Image: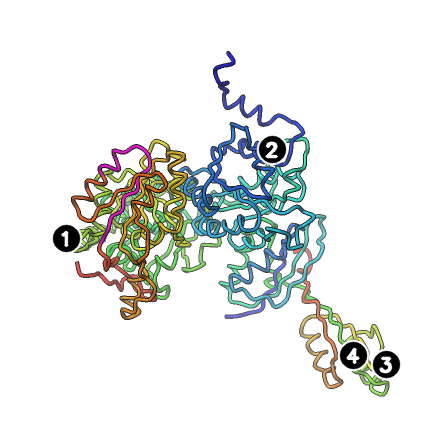
Amino acid sequence: MSAQTPEVRSTEQLREKWMKPEVITGSEILLRSLLLEGVECVFGYPGGAVLYIYDAMYGFEDFKHVLTRHEQGAIHAADGYARASGKVGVCIATSGPGATNLVTGIATAYMDSVPLVVITGNVATSLIGTDAFQEADITGITMPITKHSYLVRDVNDLPRIIHEAFHIASTGRQGPVLIDIPKDVSAATTLFQPEDKINLRGYNPRTVPNKLQLDKLARAIEQAERPMILAGGGVIYSGAHEALHEFVNKTGIPITTTLLGLGGFPSGHELWTGMPGMHGTYTSNQGIQQSDLLISIGARFDDRVTGKLAGFAPNAKIAHIDIDPAEIGKNVPTDIPIVGDVKTVLEMLNPLVSYASKADAWRDQISKWKAEYPYRYVDSDTVLKPQWVIEMLNDTTKGEAIVTTDVGQHQMWAAQYYKFNRPRSWITSGGLGTMGFGFPSAIGAQMANPDRLVISINGDGGMQMCSQELAICAINNIPVKIVVINNQVLGMVRQWQELIYDNRYSHIDLAGSPDFVKLAEAYGVKGLRATNKEEARQAWAEAMETPGPVLVEFVVEKGENVYPMVPQGSTIDQMLMGDA
Amino acid sequence: MSMKHTIAVLVNDQPGVLQRVSGLFGRRGFNIESITVGQSEEAGLSRMVIVTTGGDNMLEQIEKQLYKLIDVIKVINLSSKPMVARELALIKVKAEPSERPEIMGVVETFRASVVDIGASSMMVQVVGDTVKIDAMIELLKPYGIQELSRTGVTAMVRGNA
C-alpha cells in the first residue's frame, strides 16, 4: 500500500486493532470499547469533566462523533438513531449542567423503551460529594428514568461496565443505561482487556413464553366472536412485524396499532383500523370497547390508549403479551398473561392458531365502521389545513419516508394521516411527550439511514425548543426535510383550553416567533414558506428536489382541532367527532 | 384489601442499592412501614426486609418492579409462608429509684432486659414481633418514655422453606 492511499482495513482488522491489549487511559478504553460494541456514531458535547475523553478522540479517525449544539439535541439524536436502526444510541456529555441537560432525553427514551448508553463525565472521585464545580449526582438524579446506571470508580471496571451497559440497554425491555465516569478514571491508565462475557445474576429477561398460556390464547381465539388486536411498540422493537402480519392473516382478527406501534403493521391492510385512544379512530375505539377478546401485543395500556380504566373493554377477555412481566396486570386485569419476547411469542403462536371463524359478523361490522368513520376534516381553498399538508406529504412520498415528529397537534395529525407500511419509519415521543424531540431525532434517524428520506414534522412551538441543531444539519449536510406546521399557537394546549377550559386562552400565543425561513437560512439551511395549497405543493416539490437539508414552513389555520377526541376521564367510546 | 406484607429482597451489596429500592417504593406509591438492611449468608449480597401495606395487586407490582432492578437478585414474600419476624427496640423510660421495681416487673414479664441505668431513667431492650413491642411500649408509656428507637422488622421463613 502506497503512502498516498488511505489504509483500508476490514472490520476484523479494525477489531483486532481496537482489542489490542495495551496500557491506555480510561478514555481510550471507553472509545475502543464503544467501537467493539459496534457503535457507528456518537452524539455529544464536550466540557471540563470529559476533556480526557475528547482528547482521546483527537486524531482517532475510527471514532465518529457528531458535535451538537445542546446536550438535549445530542440525546434526542441518539434516540432517533436507536429507534430508526434498532441499534443502541450513544451520547456523551460533561458533568453537572451537561449531564442534567440530558435528563429530559433519558426520560423520553425510558418511557418509550429505547436502548441508549448515556455517558457522562463527573468530577474526580476525590471531589465527589464536595459540591465541586460542575458536580451533579447524575446517577442519583436519573435513577427513576434509567434501566440501570453505573458510577465508575476504578478504571479496571470500565470494559466490564461498558459491555454490561450495552447488554442491559439492548435486551429484555430495552431502555437507557447511564455510565458516569469521573475525570480521574478517564485519565487513569491500565492494561486494556476487552470484556466479552456477561455475568449478571439479577438480570435474566424471559423471552420464551409459557406454552400453556399460548394454548389458552389459541382456544380463546377459536371461541371469540368479537376479537381485537391491540399492537404496540413492542412489535417494532422485537422485529415482530412479519410474525404479526402472519398472525393477523391466519386469524383474521382486526388490528389497531398504538402511537408507538404505527408501522408495525401495514396501514393498507383491510383489517387495520388505525390508532386507538384519545385521538384514535372510531373503529379502533369501538372495536376495543365491544370486543370479547382483546389481545395486546407489546403494548402497555397507557392512559392515552385506555381512557377511563373502569370502563375499558368491559366485556373482553384480556390477553397480554409483553416482555416486561411488570406490565402485565399493572393497569388492566389480565386473563391470559404471556411473558416473552413478542417475536418469539408470535412465532410460537402462529402454528397453533386458526381462522377466527365465529367472527365473520364482527369483521363486517369493523369494515362498515371503517368506511363510515374515517378521519375527517373540513378542507379549505383559502387557508392551508394541517391535515391536508400531512396528506400531501404522504401522497408525494407514498408512505415510504421515515417521519419524526415533535409533540402536540401536528404529531396527532401525522399519526392519523401519514400511512406507514414499514417498521422503524415513525419516530415520536409517545410516553413522555417531549417537545423539542422531533427535529434532533430526525438527525439521528438520518445518520442511521443515509439513503432514506427523513421528514421531521414539527409545530412552531417545538421547533423552537431544539432549532439550534440546524447547525449540525448544515455543517454535516444531513439532508433532513424539516417541516414546520406553523399555526402561531401552542395548538394542543389551545384545543384543550377551547374545549375544556371554556375558551380561556392562557399563554398559547406564539407571537414573536422567528421567521422560520430566515432562521433556517441563518444556519445555511435552505428555507421555504407556503401559505396555500399551490405554494405548498411547489415548496415541497422544491424541497424534495434539493439535496441536503431544507426547512419548509407551512402556515396553517390557527383554530384547527384534532378529532376525534376522547376527553380525559371518559371511556374511549365517548368521542368528540368534530364538525367534519 | 389492604394487608401488611413482609418481603425479603436479596440485593447486590453495591453503593446506591438502598436508594434504588427505596426510590422505587417512593415513586410508585408503595408504602414502606419499615426497612432493614444487612449482610446476608453470601459475600457480596445484602438482605433487605421490607414491611409494606397494600392489596394483592400492589404486592404483585412491588415484586415485579423490584425484579426489574438489576441489583435485585431475589424477592421472597415471607408473609405468605410461616415466618419468624423480629424487631428490637430500645426504650429510655423515666424511672426514679422508687419506680424501678415496678418497671422491672414489666421488663421481666416481657423477657426484656435493662441495658443501662441513669440517675432518673432506665434503658430497656426488648426483642420480639411487632405486636409484642407495641404492647411493651404501651405499658411503659405511663412512666414517661424519653426516647424510643426501633430497628424495624427482620424476618425469615420457618423450617427448610
Task: Determine whether A310 is above or below A414 in the image.
Answer: below
* Front position in the image: A242 or A72: A72
In this rendering, position of residue A394 left or right of residue B120: left
Give how far across and how far down residue A505 sits, in percent.
30, 66
Who is closer to the viewer here, A21 or A371? Answer: A21
Instruction: Return the disc, 3 or 4, that comes first in the chain's sequence.
Output: 4
Q: Position of residue A171 (x, y in %)?
A: 50, 42
Q: Residue furthest bottom?
A: B98
- Is residue A177 rendered to the left or right of residue A436? right
Name the outermost residue toward the left.
A381
Residue contact at pointers 3 and 4, CB within 8 angstroms:
no
Q: Secondary structure at mark 4?
A: helix
Amino acid type, callout 1: Thr
Q: CA distance from mark 1 to mark 2?
A: 60 Å
Mark 4–mark 2 distance (CA, rounded to whole Å): 68 Å
Q: Which residue is mark 4?
A: B109
At mark 3, the secondary structure is loop
Q: Between tags 3 and 1, which lies in front?
A: 1
How far apart marks 1 and 4 lie (CA) works out to: 92 Å
Gap between marks 3 and 4, in whole Å? 24 Å
A206 relative position to B147: left or right: left
Identify the residue under disc 1: A382
| Mark 2, residue position | A28
Amino acid under label 2? Glu
- The answer for which chain carries disc 4 is B
Residue A232 percent across, percent down from the top left: 37, 49
Numbered disc 2: secondary structure: helix
Q: Is residue A278 visible?
A: no
Chain under callout 2: A
Q: Is residue A385 visible?
A: yes
Q: Are marks 2 and 3 on the same chain?
A: no
Reading the image, the residue beneath label 3 is B119
